[in-house]
Image: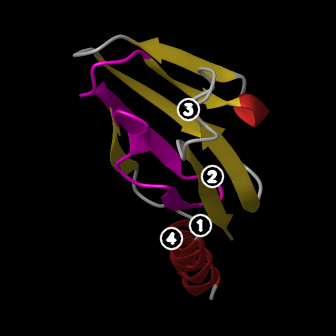
């Protein structure tokens, strides 16, 4: 009887571990061209690692700023950079290019994080 209970407990543990796994890394390439991002919406799940490759394919400097996450990456024309982070709460978080006039011209987007 004890052996059956132990087997059941072990199986339940495996089932719980399988249900609680984190989602796979969300890989995104975000391209800055002159006064536009390649996308304005990035969707992910709470706790999911987000890996973003930023590329500046324009002729102007651009930066990727996420004020809520204290991220600010400046890219000169032709540069690229990859960064990773996790957002642990559901909701929306804005990203912009904060170089004067760029956000107002449309270089803004958001992360939509779901449960």
Say which of marks 4 and 3 sits in front.
3
Q: Find the distance from the CA under tag 2 to the CA under tag 1.
A: 11 Å
Q: Find the distance from the CA under tag 4 to the CA under tag 3.
A: 50 Å
- How crowded pointer 2 is (Cα within 10 Å; few <14, some 14-19, many 20+) is rated as some
Q: For residue 80, which quarter of the picture?
A: top left
Q: Which residue is mark 2?
A: 47
Q: Which residue is mark 3?
A: 102
- The location of residue 16, given as percent across then percent down, is 60, 73
Q: Quadrant of the N terminus?
A: bottom right
Q: Which residue is mark 1?
A: 20
SS at circle 1:
loop
Q: For residue 3, which quarter of the picture?
A: bottom right
Whichever of labels 4 and 3 marks the residue nearer the N terminus, that label is 4
Q: Is 81 within the magenta?
A: no
SS at circle 4:
helix
- The location of residue 110, given as percent across then percent down, is 61, 53
């Amino acid at each position: 009887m004890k052996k059956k209970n132990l087997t059941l407990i072990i199986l339940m543990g495996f089932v719980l571990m399988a249900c609680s796994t984190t989602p796979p890394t969300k890989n995104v390439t975000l391209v800055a061209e002159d006064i536009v991002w390649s996308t304005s919406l990035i969707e992910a799940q709470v706790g999911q690692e987000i890996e973003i490759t930023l590329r500046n394919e324009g002729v102007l400097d651009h930066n990727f700023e996420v004020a809520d996450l204290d991220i600010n990456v400046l890219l000169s024309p032709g540069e690229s950079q990859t960064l990773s982070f996790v957002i642990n709460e559901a909701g929306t978080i804005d990203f912009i290019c904060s170089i004067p006039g760029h956000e107002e011209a449309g270089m803004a987007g958001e992360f939509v994080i779901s449960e």
